[in-house]
Amino acid sequence: MKYQSVKGMEDILPQDSRIWQELERIARIELESNGYREIRTPILEETSVFTRSIGETTDIVSKEMYTFEDRKGRSLTLRPEGTAPIVRAYVEHSLNQLDPQLRLYYIGPMFRAERPQKGRSRQFYQIGAEIIGSREPQMDAEIVLRLKNLLEYFGLGGFSIKLNSLGCKEDKAKFKERLSLYLKDKKTGLCDDCKVRAEKNVLRALDCKNETCIQILRDAPNIIDSLCADCKDHFDKVKELMGVFNIGFVEAKNLVRGLDYYTGTVFEINHSDLGSQDAIGAGGRYDTLVKEFGGPDVGAVGFAIGMERVIIALGEKKEQLNKSKLVCIIPLGNNAKIAGMKLAADLRRKLNGLPTERSYALNIITRLNLDDASLNSQMRSANKNNAELVIILGEDELKNNSVSIKDMKKKDEQLLVKMDRVVDEIGKRLGLPC
C-alpha cells in the first residue's frame, strides 16, 4: 500500500526547509532583539478556549475547526490560531507577574479544515507576536512596526497595510445595529452565509469575500462614525504614530477581521501576488480577552503572519533565503578518512562560529563523504548538490600535510594548501571574516 500525506497537510522537503528555517531565524533575531520572548503552547486545547474567544458564529468555529472527543469524552481542538492559547497560558501561569507589559512571540503550526488552495493549507504555519498589559496607542504602532519590519527583513516588498478601528464593546454593539438596519432590505442579495451572518453576527458579513456581498456592503455605514470619544481619540493617536514611524497605510472602513475577540485597532497586510486570498498578515487589539479568561483587566495587541503566504509572495526572491554554502570533503583511503573527520570537525567549529556565535552560523555546511566511491563519482555528487568548494584528501596530499581545494564555480581552478591554512583559505573563498 502506498501512503500519502493527508489532504491539505503538506510535507516540507529538505530542499525547501532551509527557506523556512531562515524565515524563523530572522523572526527570532528581530523579535528577541526588541524584547519579545518565545512561548510554545500545545497544539491541542480544550474546545471552549476557541469557542469562547473566537466566537461560535465565526467561520473558524462553525466550519473550520478540527474538533474531537478524547477517550474520556473531553472535547479537544487542534489550535486554529495562536492568540487564544497564549491568553490561556498567560492567565493560567500568572505571567503578568513576569512583566507588566509582556512581549511574547510564537512560531508553529495551526489547523483549519478549509478547502485547500493557494496559500491556504489545512495545516499551516504562523509567526506571531503579542504585547499583553497595555492599552496605550504606542503599542498598536509598535506591533504594526514589528510586522512591517519582519516582512522587509524577509526581503518582501510591494505589500500594503489596511487599518481600522472597531472601538470598544459598546461601539461594536452600536455599529451592529446600524449595519443590521442597512442590510434589512438587502438580505435577498447576500450569499447564503451572509444571510445567516446578518441574523447571528452581522459584523462577519463585512469579512465576506463573495463579490456580490462586497458590492452590497461597499456603501455600508462607516464604523468610525460609531466610535465613542475615547476610542476615536485612541485611533487618531495610532494613525499619528504610524506617520511618526513612516508606516504607510490605507484606512479601510470595512476591515473587521474574522475573530470576535478584536476590539479597537485592527489591521491587515495584503500582497497582490497572493490572488483573491491576499492577506499575508493581520492582527489588532483584544482588550477584553484576558479578563474574559479570568485574568487581570489588561489590554493586549498582536499580529500573525502566514509563513506559506510569505514564501509565495517572495516568488524567486525566496531562493535568496536558501543561501547555504556547501563544502565537500573527499577523502581517498582509510588514512585520509581519519584526517578528513578531523578537518571537517575543525571547519564546522571555526567556520560556524562555535563555541562563539557568528551571524553566518547557519550558512556553511561541511559534508564529509566516508564511502569508497571513486573521486569522479564523488565530484559528480558534489556538483549535483551545488557545492561551492571541494577539499580533496589523497595519499599525496597527506604526505605533504596538505589538501587540494577545487573551486566548483571556477572549473579549472585547483589549489594545493597546507593543512594549517585550510580554514583561513576556505573562509576567504566563501567571503567570511575569518
Image: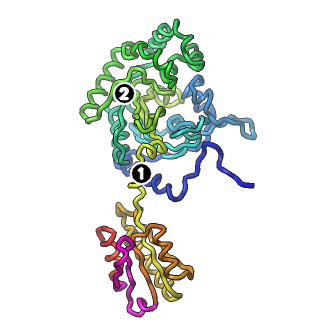
* For residue 369, above or below residue 234: below
SS label for mark 2: strand
Q: Nearer the viewer, residue 94 or 70?
A: 70
Q: Is residue 300 visible?
A: no
**Mark nearer the viewer, 1 or 2:** 1
Give percent across and percent down for residue 367: 48, 72
Density class for disc 2 (Cα within 10 Å; few <14, some 14-19, many ≥20) is many
Report the residue marked by disc 2: 163
Give percent across and percent down for residue 352: 39, 67
Magenta residues (range): 395-420
Q: Is residue 344 visible?
A: yes
Q: Nearer the viewer, residue 58 or 236?
A: 58
* For residue 421, above or below residue 105: below
Which quadrant is home to the N terminus? Answer: bottom right
Give percent across and percent down for residue 199: 58, 13
At horizontal 60% and vertical 29% (from top left) the residue drawn is: 61
Q: Nearer the viewer, residue 313 or 307?
A: 313
**Badge 1 or badge 2: first in the primary sequence:** 2
Q: What amino acid is labelled 2 in the image?
A: Leu
Give percent across and percent down for residue 282: 43, 34
Report the residue marked by disc 1: 318
At horizontal 50% and vertical 25% (from top left) the residue drawn is: 209
Density class for disc 1 (Cα within 10 Å; few <14, some 14-19, many ≥20) is many
**Does 418 appear in magenta?**
yes
Q: Residue furthest front?
A: 412
Quote the CA–CA distance across marks 1 and 2. Answer: 28 Å
How many badges with numbers are in the image?
Answer: 2
Q: Residue furthest left?
A: 244
Which quadrant is home to the C terminus? Answer: bottom left
